[in-house]
Image: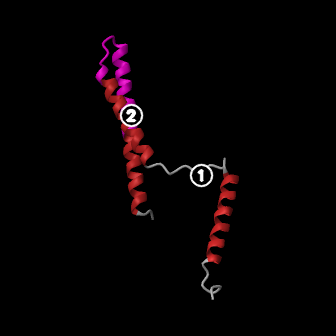
Amino acid sequence: MMNETGDRKAFISRIGTFFLILGVLVIIIFIATDIGDEAYFRYFFIGIILLSIGFILKRMSAPPPPPSKRFEGIRKIQQKSRDAKAKKDAAKNDPKKKK
């Protein structure tokens, strides 16, 4: 069973897909009017707006990308440095060693 945020993201994704399909259909109508020698540019602009809304909604509900492996070695070195510093500070502030 999905949690409420998962349900909401799935719903937003479906709405985004709806707007994408609707935008493509409106642009196809524009192309058909252009072939018919009487282009209605309002269909083109409406299609672009619908495609943009659909793309934004799909991106909002997409999962975050996995972390990059590019600088993994540098991150490990930095983490070891932070751990060593925290251990040193903990040993320095240890009340058992103070007399």
Amino acid found under the numbered disc labelled 2: Leu
Q: Main secondary structure of the magenta part?
A: helix
Task: Please report whichever mark, 2 or 1, sits nearer to the chain's N-terminal start.
Answer: 2
Give the residues drawn in magenta, as a range: 19-42
Mark 1: give few (<14), some (14-19) or many (20+) Cα within 10 Å: few
Residue 90 at x, y percent in the picture: 62, 75
Residue at the far bottom in the pictured view: 99
Quadrant (top left, top right, bottom left, bottom right) of the C terminus: bottom right
Q: From the viewer's perspective, tell me whether residue 47 is left or right of residue 62.
A: left
Inspect the magenta stretch and tell me whether residue 25 lies in it.
yes
Residue 68 versus residue 1 in the image, above or below = above
Residue 94 versus residue 7 in the image, above or below = below
Q: Residue at x 40, y 37 (%)?
A: 20
Distance from disc 2 to disc 1, alpha carbons, whole Å, reads: 29 Å
Residue named by callout 2: 51
Nearer-the-camera pick, 62 or 98: 98
Residue 77 at x, y percent in the picture: 69, 57
Q: Residue at x 41, y 53 (%)?
A: 9
Secondary element under disc 1, as helix, strand or loop, is loop
Residue 79 at x, y percent in the picture: 65, 61
Nearer-the-camera pick, 24 or 41: 41
Secondary element under disc 2, as helix, strand or loop, is helix
Residue named by callout 1: 67
Residue at the far front in the pictured view: 99
How many numbered dots are placed on residues in this image? 2
Rendered image quadrant of residue 27? top left
Residue 89 at x, y percent in the picture: 62, 72
Residue 65 versus residue 24 in the image, above or below = below
